[in-house]
Each structure stands twice: as structure tokens, then as C-alpha cells.
Amino acid sequence: MPRISVKVEQIRPSATITVSAEAMRLKAEGRDIVSLSAGEPDFDTPKHICEAAVAAIHAGQTRYTQVDGTPELKAAIAQKLRAQNELEYEPDQIIASNGAKQSLFNLMMAVLNRGDEVIVPAPYWVSYPDMVKLADARPAILSATAENDYKITPRELANSLNDDTRMVILNSPSNPTGKVYSGDEYRGLGEVLLEHPKVFIACDDIYEHIYWGDGPFRTFLNACPELADRTVLINGVSKGYAMTGWRLGYLAGPADLVAAMRKIQGQSTSCPSSISQAAAVAALTGPQACIEEMRQAFEQRYRYIRETLNTIDGVECPECDGAFYAFPSFQAVIDRMDAVRDDVELATWLLNEAGVATVPGTAFGAPGHLRLSFASSMEELEDAISRIRNALSGL
């Protein structure tokens, strides 16, 4: 029987997808499960975006497009970056893909070689390290501490860089912590990276619109414009516009790098869906009030879930400024449970005993934590927290 490739054998299935699938399986069997595992807004895609997609179908826009996206979509992305981020990009510096995830994957395939190293700050999104491995490079996990607000410092970054370092990934607001780098914090990291000209900076801004911190959202290049020749911005419409299933992300960066990614995409998935591209144009250029409505709802849910989690004995839930995840420490709970040794076993225990699906922090490089998505209705959140409290009350 043909052998599976070594690179596939060394990667893990996505923990978030695995937990969500298990929750759905249990629901299908009739179990009463509340799932806080998926990173997916519970809102419907706004009506004007759906109407634009329907109009595109009726207009016959159902054929292949340019590999990197239609001129209309790339113009809309450039206008968004100009108006919202104060950054200038030409069409040849932009590529649209089947989700921000593919944009990041194509970037790694275009940049990394065997022996290269990528600095991945932890806690990290579950797919970062395995994407690096698929590109034949090595993930170098740089663990951020609670004392530093789960953000890496310039000194930590400087001590981690070496001759093999080819890329640094920065994710703000963060999945899973919801932490956001300030302009000054980005500037400190940028001053370190200025001394390392071989290193690319991948800035994952997919949760940009789900933000409630003090002051306006700042992306890395707002603080470090002199690093534009080796920085890429990754974003999309999935989170801010409740368009996860439309699979439309994009990347902006140096033209030569985008050209290399275009070659990779042309030999893999080719263009994104023509209908999704038309919908994304409507999202980026149409009314933006829907973003604020959803953002306010997420912030309200965040305030509730953080406050209530912190009333449970042994649970510590820190503040955050964005995304739709709580990332509390359950280590004190684990320490007093005889039948549970770590966060992975605790997540399984809560699924079986409380009927609540969470994702263990180990999947994000942060043992002792659980990630709870609050991209659910307030009623579901209240039910889930009540179940967790009741299940843990007898310990």
C-alpha cells in the first residue's frame, strides 16, 4: 500500500475542527451539547452582501476569474486598506484567496525552505505550527507569559532570532487570547526586526473589526512603515462580516512576493469563488453599520463571560481587547481533580459531564487553559457557564 508522506505524518488535525466535529456528532446522537469550540460568528451574513451575491449569479458571474481576484475586488481591498488602515497598495500587491488561511499557507509555501525557522508566539492559532511544517520549515515556539499580557517583548524576540529565522508571525487581536498589540508595542518589535533584514513579518489581522480596546486599531505597518518591503498583511471578510462559509481572504505585501504566491495559487486552487468575490466587494464597499452591531454584541458577551468565569473557584479569565474568545486558566481546577491530569482531559470531562464543548489550551501552546468561543447567543453562553459551574461545584 502506498505510504503517506512524512510531512503529513508529522502534523496534527486542527484541534478546533476536531472538537467542533465531535460536538456535532454528539448532537446528532441526541446529546444535549452546547458548543463553545468554533471560531465562527453566529450572525447571518448581512442582507446587502447576500443580495450582491445573488445579483452576481443572475448576471452570469459564474466563471473563472483572475487567479488573484477580480480587478473590482482588488480595488475594494486597496480602498479598504487606504481608508481604514492608512496604507497604500497597488493591485499587483494584493491577492485574494479561499480564506485568510489559504493566504497564509501560500505565503509560507512561497517564502520558506528546508531548514528555515519561523517564530510562532504562543499562545498561537492552532494551524500556524503545522503550516510551517508543511512548508518544510521549523516552528520556533516563543511562549509569551501572563505577566507580559500574553504578548512577546522586544527582548524575547531579539533572543529568539538567529541565522535560520526567516519569518515572524504576529496575530492581533489574537486567537486565542484576544490580546492586542499597541502601536508602541509593535514599534518595539519593529526596531528589533530592523536589524534582521532576512526576516519576513506576517501580520494576521483577521479579527481587526472585533476590537474594543482604547484608541483606534493599529496594524504593524502603522507603527513600522519602513518594514513594508518585508511585511505582509493577512485579512479577510469571514470574521468581521460573518462570512466564514464564503471562504474569501486576502493578503497585501511586496509585489514580487505576491507574484510568487499567485504562481502557487494558480497551480493549486486557482481563483476564489466568483460569487464570493462579488459578495466581498459588497462587504468592503457597502454599508459598514453591520460591523459595529456585531462588534457591540461580541463586547457585551465578552463582559459577561469574563465576569462570570471569574466567579468560578479555580478559574482565572484575563481581560482582552478583541476577537471572540475567552482564554481562562483552569490550572487550579485541574490540580484538585483526581480524574483529570491536564487541560485535554478537562475538556473531555466537561464535554461528557457538562455537555459543553471547549478547546484545550495545549492545542494553542498554552497548557492549563481552555478556549471558550463567545460567538454564540447570550442564552447559549449563560447555559454553558451554568453547566460548567454546576459540574465543577462538587469538586
Image (spheres, grey):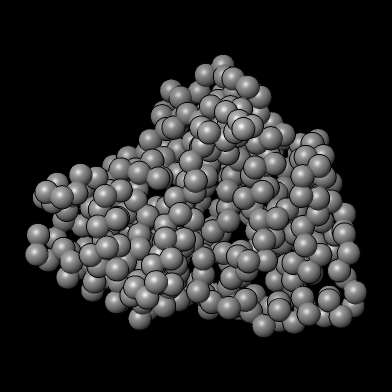
In this rendered view, identify the residue nearer to me: 213 or 23: 23
Q: Who's the residue at 25% across and 53% down the image?
A: 346
Residue 173 appears left or right of 103: left
In this rendered view, identify the residue nearer to me: 374 or 285: 374
Residue 293 appears at what percent x and percent y?
A: 53, 78
87 shown above or below 246: above
Q: Who's the residue at 82% across and 45% down the image?
A: 266
Residue 68 appears at what percent x and percent y?
A: 81, 51
- Which corner quadrant of the image does residue 84 belong to? bottom right
Q: Is residue 392 visible?
A: yes
Q: Quadrant of the N terminus?
A: top right
Residue 258 appears at what percent x and percent y?
A: 78, 41
Most distant residue in the front direction: 1
106 shown above or below 16: above
Q: Is residue 328 visible?
A: no
Residue 231 appears at what percent x and percent y?
A: 66, 38
Q: Quadrant of the C terminus?
A: bottom left
In this rendered view, identify the residue nearer to me: 213 or 349: 349
Most distant residue in the top direction: 163
45 shown above or below 226: below
Q: Who's the residue at 59% across and 23% down the image?
A: 116
Q: Who's the residue at 29% across and 55% down the image?
A: 348
Residue 52 appears left or right of 141: right
